[in-house]
Image (spheres, rainbow, N blue to C red):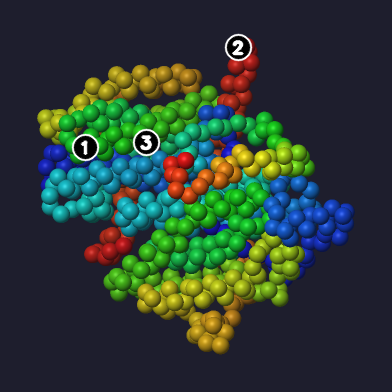
Amino acid sequence: MHAADGKMALEHARDTYTRRMEGVSLWVLPSAQIIASDPGDAAALFAPAEDKIYRHPTFYKIPDGITHI
Amino acid sequence: MYTTDLSGKKAKPEAAITENPAKLAAFEARVAADEFIEPKDWMPEAYRKTLIRQISQHAHSEIVGMLPEGNWITRAPNLRRKAILLAKVQDEAGHGLYLYCAAETLGVSRDEMTEALLSGKAKYSTIFNYPTLTWADIGAIGWLVDGAAIMNQVPLQRTSYGPYARAMVRICKEESFHQRQGYEIMMHLAAGTDAQKRMAQDALDRWWWPSLMMFGPPDDKSPNTEQSMRWRIKRDTNDELRQKFVDITAPQAEAIGLSVPDPALKWNETRGAYDFGDVDWEEFYAVVRGEGPVAKERNQARVKAWENGAWVREAARVHAEKRANAKIAAE
Amino acid sequence: MDSALPPLAAYAARLGDDSLILGQRLGEWCGHAPALEVDLSLSNVALDLIGQATHFLGLAGAIEGAGRDADKLAFHRDVMDFSNCLLVEQPNGDFAQTIARQFLFSNYQALLFEQMAQVKDERFAPIAAKALKEVKYHATLASDWVVRLGDGTDESKTRMVAGLNWMWRFADELFVMDDVDAAAIANGAGVDKAALRAAWDARIDAVLAEATLARPAARRPIVGGRVGRHSEHLGHVLSAMQFLQRAYPGANW
């Protein structure tokens, strides 16, 4: 999105990105202000979570017949 | 709407020979494994250049593509059609925007891309250099041109460059209504009065061949195809897509009682596909060179919009600066 | 004004015609705006207005009860039966002139629909309530542009002043009351437009002040749109808009 000021960015974002009822809130910020992670660091950032499957509900085995859990 | 393989006869493939072989091998392995390449990743210069060219051509096509359809917004035949057409042309503007943003992640600015479009240096899909003469052309564009575009774009959702692929996901989702509304217009016309039916057939006659040209030159004349396929910038060849388009579209025409303007069109039982006549490639290359029937009008419209808007963009910039300075002064 | 329409239908037709003609005007911009983002904004506003026109003209036809639907009213009446205000049929001009028109009109519509959303009539109120959400945004969008252009460069200020001067002549008509308005109010559907004027003035003045612009001088108002006395522009708007319906009578699209 190109815009001269914040208000304009918000209005342009509204006109571009809510045409099909997507979203409940709009956040805009100058792209130069975004600090993104380096793809080279992807392993350090994301891999450590790979084996922590106990964070997902499907990790836990519940016997058949037990419902609403 | 869409991108065309606009390779002229003389275009040479972008060579990747000057790159660091180890980096190149690692890159190609990632692409071969269907991983996405992201803006900060290392990529061969030829990949970056090809992508910038392809994405910006695609974006330009969306923007110039607004003009032939925009030509009928004020004359749409009823309120429903007017709203649909406005929403559709507006979508094209949005798609142009997503694509310019995707191209910007490769280090080219929108102003540079716009400049290339306005100066005639950058290409866009040849189809938009044909005029929209009657209301049926709006139907034909939705049905045939968007139909061809979707065929080309669906595989691009899995293209190797992440920002491009993600833009395509959004575009494909939004475009799902474009082709249907076009076919619906044609259905109404084909089932309407004699005058409407004549209008529909005339539009199909004029748009059929240019639509087949949208897939680009035949595979043996498309120098970039092999490398682009390997780099997953392109996922099917021009001829494969063209065949698929004919196979899907010919029965759609028949179903509403319109005839495809190709005497050679015939179902081939053994191939399980339609045989069809030769595309006039001389016409295609002429349109690529900028000799399309309304190429000058399209360019003039974009130049005028850009020049007439210069003072508006400048005012917005100056106003923002004034406000920012006032804020600093107050702090 | 369409003499065949009963007063309440005529009231709905005025609302519909306002939205239709302005939507039609904004549609002319599509593909030609100063920036891609602005193209999206202007088409969004146009789409909202075409939607409002569909609702209000549909309502006008339903109240009339003679089998005319929104399309019949939009595409088969001539200039003298159109009842939109003169403001909305004014040419787009440059972007400043378009914004001036939108600024004056959307602020009026926002105040109007705020009131109409509360009326007793169960046909008018819901359309107004829906439209209110749309026009509030239009008013903000246009007001922000007035500020940017007014307090931008010398050129943008000159153009914004010229645009406002062009449109200002037609602002008073927005608030003129007549028998149709009185009948609509008596039937629990209408709004006292004259009573909106003070709030409208306050909104306009606040934005103009922020835009460092002076309010255009008061002048003799130009009126007549509500009773079918239009500018020369409307005939050309209609000749494009109604072309297909006129050239192919009786066809379905």
On what subunit does the disc labeled 3 rest? Answer: C
Residue B155 pos. (x, y %): 60, 62
Counting residues from the start of the chain, the first of labels 3 and 1 encountered is 1
How far apart are the two marked residues, 3 and 2, measured between alpha carbons? 35 Å
Spot occupied by residue A55 in the image (x, y as percentages of width and height): 61, 38
Quadrant where the image shows the N terminus of chain C: top left
* Residue under label 2: B330
Residue at numbered disc 3: C134
Q: Could you tell me the amino acid type at mark 3?
A: Glu
Can residue B236 be seen in this snapshot?
yes
Looking at the image, which is closer to me, B151 or C186? B151
Mark 2 lies on a secondary structure that is helix
Residue at 79% over, 48% down = B42
Label 2 is placed on what type of residue?
Ala
Identify the residue at image location x=42%, y=75%.
B253
Q: Residues within 10 Å of mark 1 (few under 14, many from 20)?
A: many
For residue B220, side relative to residue C189 (left or right): right
The chain containing the residue under callout 1 comes to C
- Give left or right: position of B34 versus C52: right
What residue would you read off at disc 1?
Answer: C124
Nearer to the camera, B223 or A63: A63
Q: Secondary structure at mark 3?
A: helix
Residues packed near mark 3 inside 10 Å, few (<14), some (14 to 19) or many (20 plus): some
Marks 3/2 in contact by CB < 8 Å: the verdict is: no
As drawn, the label of residue A43 is none
